[in-house]
Every structure is written in structure tokens, then in C-alpha cells.
Image (tube, grey):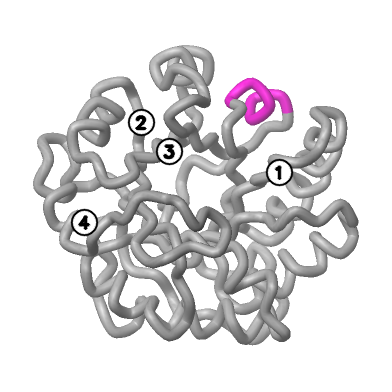
Amino acid sequence: MNTSTSLAGVYGLTPEWDDTDRLIDGVRAAARGGMRVLQLRRKLVTPEQRRAQALALRDETLKLGVLFIINDDWRLALDVGADGVHLGRDDGDIAAARAAGPHLRIGATCYNELPRAQAALAAGADHLAFGAVFGSPTKPAAVHAPLSLFAQARALPGAAHVPLVAIGGITPDNAAQVTAAGADALAVISALFDSADIEATARRLHQAFSAQPVGSAGAVPAATTSAISPALPPIL
């Protein structure tokens, strides 16, 4: 488990790909382009299939120096040795996850609700996600979270150094707007993994951080064209 690297930068969410080899190839390409965080988000598979992919991705992300987050299931995150878990409205108790995994990075989906963000922090979350910041092909009915929400979230008690994650409809063409608003990480599914060139798309998303200082989680280093390995500089 990686407890030293900050959660910031390009944050990939896995597509619904059953082919694990294809998924790993995509993750490697995204990491070469600068992806720093990967979340396993599989909604349409059995628990056994999800666990098998989680184990494979845990091994690969350790090699790549990429933080590995499990969506929804903190028990699975502990089982496979993931770096963290991301919990939504119906995904369980943040306080229970924190008690079971004191060193887990726990993210909370806050939609467009500052009171929910404050409650999540009080329960033990250490990063907060807001969205959809733009129309999302993955969740077309998702609530809209205005970009002004990031400055408001940063001002919440206890949130000065908490990574803020933006999700929903983010592409290389609009990513700089989101980082300028104060997001520390850009969570992306289809714009990244459905692109014809995953590495190039990740690199363009990564460049959105070069124009703006990252909110408070630290600067995101420039991506490298070499194969990602432990030699890739960490996010500080």
C-alpha cells in the first residue's frame, strides 16, 4: 500500500472491459501519459470477476507507481491490498471503512453537496469528489456540480489540504477549466479509455495541471515518454 504519494493528477476509472490483458495494456498506456491514480470501477461483473481484475491491477499499479483505488467496496480494497476505496451515497459507512482500514485512502462522492462533503470529512474521508462538472456519457442523469464548488469546498473546515477530485464529462479540451477552478485530480473514464490513443490523451489531460498550481495536494510533475516504473517521480 502506498501511503506517501498524494492523490492528484490524472485519475483513470476503468471501463467495463472483461478482457484483463486489454485493460492492463490500457492502464500502461495511460500511465505512460501521466495517469497517477487508477480506480477499479466495474459495475457489470460478478464479485469473483471483480476480485480477479482487482488482483491483476494491484500487481500492475505497484509496478507502475500508480495509486490503486477500489470503487464501492472497502472490504475488497483491504483484501487485495489496494491503496484506497471510493464510496458513494449507497456504498457503505465511511466511518466503518476508516475503522477497518486506518491507512486506506477513503474518497467520498459528494455530488454537488457541500454539507455531504463536510459530513464525509468528519466521518474519516481524506479526499472528496464532486460532479458531474460537465455532461457525462457514463451518467447522463447525474447532477451538475458547478466549477465554483471547488473554491467553496476548499474553504470548508478541515479541507485546506484535502484532495478535491472532479468527475463527469472531463476531456482534454475542458480539463484546464477544471484545474483552474481548484480541482487536484481529474477523474476520467470514456474520454481516456475510449480514445484512439490512450497515452496521448492522458498526456493532454496531464498538461492541464501545468497551467495552474494544483489546489493544495501538491504539484503534479511532468509526464515522461519513457515506460512508467518506480523511476517516475512521485506527486509531492
**Are the two marked residues, 1 and 3, in contact with CB atoms closer than 8 angstroms?**
no
- Mark 1 nearby-residue class (10 Å; few <14, some 14–19, many ≥20): many
How far is the residue under mark 3 from the one under mark 2?
Answer: 6 Å
Could you tell which of marks 1 and 3 lies nearer the N-terminus? Answer: 1
* Tag of residue 150: 4
Q: Where is mark 2, residue-wise?
A: 125
Magenta span: helix, strand or loop, mainly?
helix
Determine the CA span between mark 2 and mark 1.
Answer: 22 Å
Amino acid at pointer 1: Arg
Question: In this image, 122 relative to 66: left or right?
Answer: left
- From the image, state whether disc 1 or disc 3 is nearer to you: 1
Q: What element carries label 2?
A: loop
Residues at circles 2 and 4 in contact by the CB criterion of under 8 Å? no
Expressed as whole percent of the image width and height from the top left, the position of residue 10 reads 49, 66
Q: Distance between the residues labelled 1 and 4?
A: 27 Å
Magenta run includes residue 76:
yes
Which amino acid, by three-letter code, is at mark 2?
A: Ala
Q: Position of residue 103 (x, y in %)?
A: 48, 28
Label 2 crowd (10 A; few <14 / some 14-19 / many >=20): many
| Residue under numbered circle 1 | 42
77 over 28 or under it: above or below: above
- Report the front residue among 113 and 14: 113
Q: Are marks 3 and 2 in contact (CB under 8 Å)?
A: yes
Q: Is residue 86 above or below residue 227?
A: above
Mark 2 vs mark 4, foreground winner is 4
Q: Of marks 4 and 3, which one's residue comes earlier in the chain?
A: 3
Element type where label 3 sits in the image:
strand
Under mark 3, the amino acid is Gly
Considering the numbered disc 4 on the image, is that residue within a helix, a strand or a loop? Answer: helix
Identify which amino acid the numbered label 4 is placed on: Phe
Mark 3 lies on residue: 107
